């Protein structure tokens, strides 16, 4: 499937959280004019029976019947939640362990976005967490939107992080929402000095030094968004990145938080170490984890 026709996919386990994921996937696909595909993963049911090979056919028939039942249930969910008509979406049933099956789909299909649900106030389940880490596509962790009207995009100012900022700009524009682009300056380790008593003490930074770091960060933010039209609030804050992002999302009542991720490659994880993971775990709004290159 060409990238221009890459679909928005949504994973459903038929829970209330997946209903919300379906709603947001439907809205997302409609806004950007992409096809919509819903998928459900069945657990592996077939077992090898070397002593009774005839049982394999019966097991396969049972699996085929179950697959048809699940496809029908998935279609009913899509019809009910999205109000789309038959033929306006696709349904897929995979077999295997849910996280691995979803990652395989993301590797096999030309996905534009994969949407997964998370229960409000309960962090991430194991499936959502593993998909966020390993899927080679951007992932939307869907939660109910309590306060529409504000998008928060966090960046570490690196060149690979530009797509996350661009995604935030686009989402704010299509939603008619205010946009904050945030960079967090985590305090560098101050030099260790000796006091007159011979005990170590941490040297403090002057307000002038702190202001200089803020101004430098803001200038880099301005350069990053220079090609994008529209009013946006650019912030360069001092503090532990994940905590500042969480506090800003609460203060601004964000309807969407956008962060970047390099995915799981060797020991590399996400955005700024574990920043994106903590944000996705703790923020009470939907989070778009944009898969970055490099």
Image (cartoon, rainbow, N blue to C red):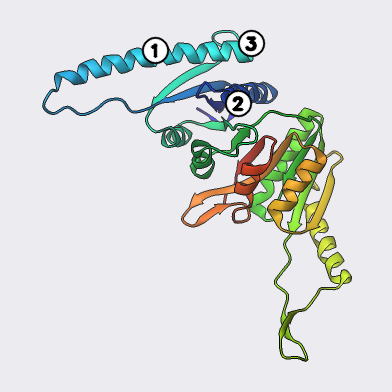
- The x and y percentages for residue 12 are 52, 24
Helix, strand or loop at label 1? It is helix
Instruction: Please give the label number shown on residue 21.
Output: 2
Q: Is residue 240 left or right of residue 269?
A: right
Q: Nearer the viewer, residue 57 or 124?
A: 124
Q: Is residue 252 left or right of residue 113?
A: right
Task: Examine the image and state in which quarter residue 33 appears.
Answer: top right
Q: Residue at x 80, y 56 (%)?
A: 237
Q: Nearer the viewer, residue 90 or 146?
A: 146
* Residue for badge 1: 68
Give the CA separation, mark 3 to mark 1: 22 Å
Instruction: Please give the label number shown on residue 225.
Output: none
- The x and y percentages for residue 98 are 43, 32
Q: Is residue 235 left or right of residue 294?
A: right
Task: Point out the residue furthest to the front here.
Answer: 197
Helix, strand or loop at label 3? It is loop
Q: Residue at x 54, y 41 (%)?
A: 132
* Residue for badge 3: 83
Mark earlier in primary sequence (2, 1)? 2
Helix, strand or loop at label 2? It is helix
């Amino acid at each position: 499937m060409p990238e221009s026709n890459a679909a928005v996919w949504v994973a459903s386990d038929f829970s209330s959280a997946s209903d919300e994921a379906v709603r947001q996937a439907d809205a997302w696909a409609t806004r950007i004019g992409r096809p919509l595909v819903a998928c459900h993963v069945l657990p592996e049911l077939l077992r090898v029976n070397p002593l009774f090979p005839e049982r394999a056919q019966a097991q396969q028939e049972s699996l085929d019947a179950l697959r048809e039942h699940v496809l029908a249930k998935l279609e009913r969910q899509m019809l009910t939640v999205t109000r789309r008509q038959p033929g306006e979406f696709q349904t897929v049933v995979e077999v295997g362990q849910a996280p691995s099956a979803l990652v395989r789909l993301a590797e096999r299909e030309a996905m534009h976005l994969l949407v997964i649900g998370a229960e409000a106030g309960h962090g991430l389940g194991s499936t959502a967490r593993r998909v966020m880490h390993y899927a080679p596509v951007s992932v939307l962790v869907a939660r109910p939107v309590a306060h529409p009207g504000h998008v928060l995009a966090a960046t570490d100012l690196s060149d690979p992080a530009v797509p996350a900022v661009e995604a935030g700009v686009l989402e704010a524009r299509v939603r008619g929402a205010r946009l904050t682009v945030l960079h967090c300056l985590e305090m560098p380790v101050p030099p260790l000095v000796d006091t007159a008593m011979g005990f170590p003490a941490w040297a403090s930074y002057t307000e002038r030094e702190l202001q200089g770091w803020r101004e430098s960060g803001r200038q880099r933010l301005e350069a990053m968004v220079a090609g994008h039209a529209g009013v946006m609030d650019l912030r360069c804050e001092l503090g532990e990145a994940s905590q500042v992002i969480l506090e800003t999302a609460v203060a601004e009542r964000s309807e969407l938080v956008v962060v970047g991720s390099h995915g799981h490659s060797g020991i590399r994880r996400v955005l700024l170490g574990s920043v994106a993971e903590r944000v996705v775990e703790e923020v009470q709004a939907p989070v778009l984890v944009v898969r970055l290159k490099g």
